[in-house]
Amino acid sequence: MARIDAFLKLGLAQGCSDVHLAVGVPPMLRMNGDLMPIKFRALSDTELETYIHEILSQAQKERLSQGHDLDFSYVAEEGGRFRVNVFRKITGVGAVFRFIPGDVPSLEKLDVPPVLAKFCDYHQGMVLVTGSTGTGKSTTLAAMINHINERRNMNIISLEDPIEFVHPSKKSQVIQREVGTHVHSFADGVRSAMREDPDVILVGELRDAETIMMAMTAAETGHLVLGTLHTTGAVKTIDRIVDALPGELREQTKAFLSMSLKAVITQVLVKTPDGRGRRAILEILVNNRAIAKLITSDQTHQIPSQLQTGKDAGMQLLDQALLDAIQAKRIDPNDAIRFANDKKKFERFVTDTDILPTLGISGGEG
């Protein structure tokens, strides 16, 4: 058994989401959003590098020695699947292990708004799940793929870096390909997928202009494309896509988004009131004629007002979703205010007024 497995086993026993290993500090566990050290000595550069090398292939060792980061999946000997990132920094090597549950979650178990199930029924177009790193985008996408897999006879091609949740084929055929192992890049993967008779293509990350263009082509030509972006709102997502492509394609890109972008889901993870878990809170855009017109006329700044009035279509602003969850006592208001855009609206719910100055708020009603 690799020695690193002992830390991973401990992390799983504690219910953590991530295990962090870095030189000069003890191993740390991400517990409900907070980083907590375990009772262990500070790791030395040589010691940690030895631990990590035990789980690397020769090709991975060579890439790491050449200064490249590594992204791969790892299955510990005693169980537990992890997404791993290995990197070098000023003090030496470091690694983060993200735990991937063995069971693919359902949309019902995630307790997300029912409109997400409707997105899974689309036959073509693009649905984006966005948010910062560690906000559960991959989990939401996995639940959407699972929803399709259990209900529709589809050919689903998933492109990931690395593969996280493993989907057994149910009603659908699910083909999972890993960037760097099975395909050279996301763009190459999408290009290949379009020759493999797909119904649904999952693109793990729209990280460059070529991938975005290939995904747009797939969405325009009769496929449902699911993807992620590291953006923090519907407006920023649309602006990011337009800005990512060459200027001469600007009008074409806006036309695509107005017609083929079906929905944008932006999520954050907020602590539950008891502090023992986190819940996904979502901002949801569902494209309609009014939003399409705002996109083509460069008035995306007016989209939030459409989200506010589009509740019947399943739309919601992040702030409103946070307020609703606070009032239903589903999330901790002291954590929720950190994610709010208009923090003054949340001030009256905060019980720990000491946090207000750190958020740029001078007063508080308590």
Image (cartoon, grey):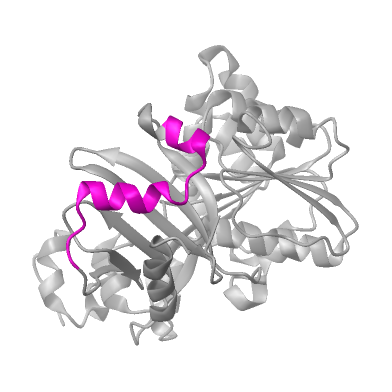
Whether residue 53 is in magenta: the answer is yes
Residue 219 pos. (x, y %): 74, 36
* Residue 364 picture location, percent across and down: 13, 75
The residue lying at 53 percent from left, 32 percent from top is 241
Q: Who's the residue at 60% across and 44% down the image?
A: 204
- Furthest toward the front, the residue is 1
How many labels were placed on the picture? Answer: 0
Residue 365, given in percent of the width and then of the height, sits at 15, 80
For the question of whether residue 131 can be seen, the reply is yes
Task: Tell which of 167 and 119 is nearer to you.
Answer: 167
Q: Viewer-proximal residue, 75 or 142?
A: 75
Residue 166 left/right relative to 37: right
Predominant secondary structure in magenta?
helix
Whether residue 216 is visible to the viewer of this picture, yes or no, is: no
Residue 32 lies in what quarter of the image? bottom left
Task: Please identify the residue farthest to the right as the structure is shown.
Answer: 153
Q: Decide if residue 108 is on the left or right side of residue 302.
A: right
Q: In this view, does 200 lie above or below 360?
A: above
Residue drawn at (87%, 60%), measured in percent from left and top? 152
Residue lying furthest top in this view? 248
Residue pictured at 84% horizontal, 45% vertical: 199
* First to last magenta residue range: 41-63
Q: Is residue 329 above or below residue 269?
A: below
